[in-house]
Amino acid sequence: MHKTSYDNSLQANKELGLVFLIGFMGCGKTTLGRKLASRLGYLFMDLDHIFEAQEGVTIGEYFSKYGEDAFRNLESEVLKTHKYPAHAIIATGGGLPCFFDNMDWMNAHGKTVYIKLSPKTLADRLQNEKDERPLLRERHGEALVQFIAEKLEEREPFYNKANIIANGLSLTAEKVEELLSFKATS
């Protein structure tokens, strides 16, 4: 890369603002988000953690006590009313983009990156985390893959509204930075 392109890339990184990472649970939003934030010198935020800190309960507990509708309403409110710094990488819950106008709101207030993976890859990644994820607890093997495939089919019309759609296999913070820089300069 010659100096002018590199300088343009650095300038673009300073102007990224908010970057929302979206995708199905297990796609790597938190892990990749932390690495990307560190690389860019940005703050990393996880909306699930913000929700839990604000409410004083886990998402699972809130979901069990008040139901999905109440959870989705409050989740949307947290997204839209939280005071964000000028520059941050924000990991969202897997379902958040699919309710209300959340996806449009994120696109209007920052950049969105969909971390895309196949149902099989997601199932392999989630197999050992099922206890922490109530929707998956009772599903195993092919039933888990099928469940994820059905959920992805419902969610992809929303996920595909992202500014950037990135193949999650071997996705690195460096690659996301390149994609964001390219998008910012084009």
Image (spheres, helix red, strand yellow):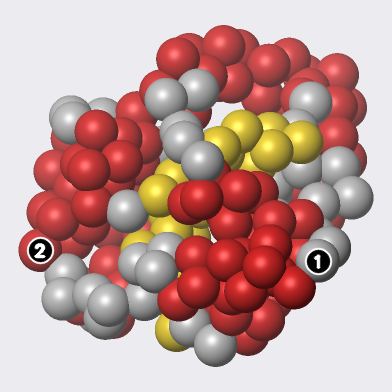
Mark sitting on residue 145: none
Is 2 drawn above or below residue 160 in the view shown?
below
Closer to us: 58 or 112: 112
Asked if 21 appears above or below 16 in the picture, the reply is above
Disc 1 secondary structure class: loop
Badge 1 local density, few (<14 within 10 Å), some, or many (20+)?
few
Can see residue 86? yes
Marks 2 and 1, the one that precedes in the sequence: 1
Horizontally, is 59 left or right of 133 in the view?
left
Q: Is residue 146 above or below residue 30?
A: above
Name the residue: 48% across, 83% down. Answer: 42
In the visual, does 180 lie left or right of 31? Answer: left
Identified by mark 1, the residue type is: His
The residue indicated by pointer 1 is 2
Residue depicted at 77% across the width and 56% down the height:
175
Q: Which residue is mark 2?
A: 81
State the residue in front, 84 or 147.
84
How far from the left and from the top, in percent, is residue 103? 30, 35
